[in-house]
Image (spheres, helix red, strand yellow):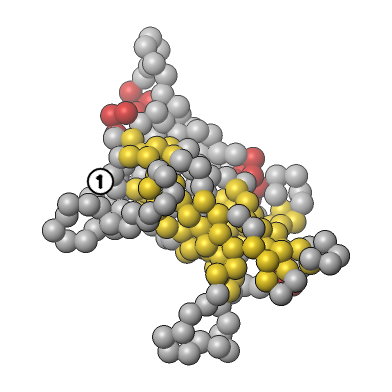
Amino acid sequence: MYPIAARACGYGERDRRVIDPPPILELRVTDSLSGRLDWEEMKYNLNVLHCTLWNEAGDAETPVVPDQRRPTRQLMGQVVSSPAIAKDENGIDSCFFCFPDLSCRQPGRYRLRFVLMRIDPLNLPVGGTNPLLANSMSDIFTVYAAKDFPGMKPSSALTKALKAQGCNIQVKKGNEKRSGKGKTPEDDDDEVFDDGDDTSSKGKGKRLRSR
């Protein structure tokens, strides 16, 4: 599940609004010979997915806000996710990576790039690196100024299913703004919650896909 829209959060921490919908990616690892899912690899808890902000064309990262005296991060929130083995909205087991609290400081059109890495605790030399196993680039999404933000969409069935299984992700009722007659002040509050690219390595096909 890739983001569609967001409300720019500016430079403060108190008014930070999350990207909507929160990105959820599914990892599927298959054996290149049998075509079967490799659950041992999918359940490896030191696989991590890292997220970065890129320009609309997808050819350059935009890590900091331009024209600032002090470097200021453009993408806010937790940019690294660990795997969650859970059932999807259809009751099928899989491996998911969730990014529930990402925010963007400035209005514009962007993409998110996700890179999968495997951490080996027995092979962590000083200054060493970990191999990149797979990557995925999101579709373009728009970050709006507060007055232009169209509102948040209701959470998907997948988001609700993951929340019910303990994933740290908010479930939203949604409140897309209505135009013209019938619009209410509550429509301007976009935080309404409900409490209730393929690569292969060593014979394994690792695929990240948006859910």
Q: Is residue 98 visible?
A: no
Tell whether 93 sits left or right of 138.
right
Residue at left offset 44%, top offset 39%: 141
Total marks placed:
1
Label 1 residue SS: loop
Q: Do we see residue 11 in this rendering?
A: yes
Residue 103, image x, y percentages = 37, 49
**Which residue is nearer to you in this view: 165 or 109?**
109
Q: Residue furthest left?
A: 69
**Eyeballing the image, is 167 above or below 42?**
above
Q: Residue at x 76, y 49 (%)?
A: 91
Q: Name the residue under label 1.
A: 10
Q: Where's the N terminus, which quadrant?
A: top right
Residue 146: quadrant of the picture: top left
Q: Looking at this view, is 180 or 148 the one in front?
A: 148
Mark 1 is surrounded, within 10 Å at the Cα level, by few (under 14), some (14 to 19) or many (20 or more) other residues, namely some
Amino acid of disc 1:
Gly
Tell me if residue 154 comes above or below residue 92 in the rendering: above
Percent coordinates x, y for residue 42 in the rendering: 69, 67
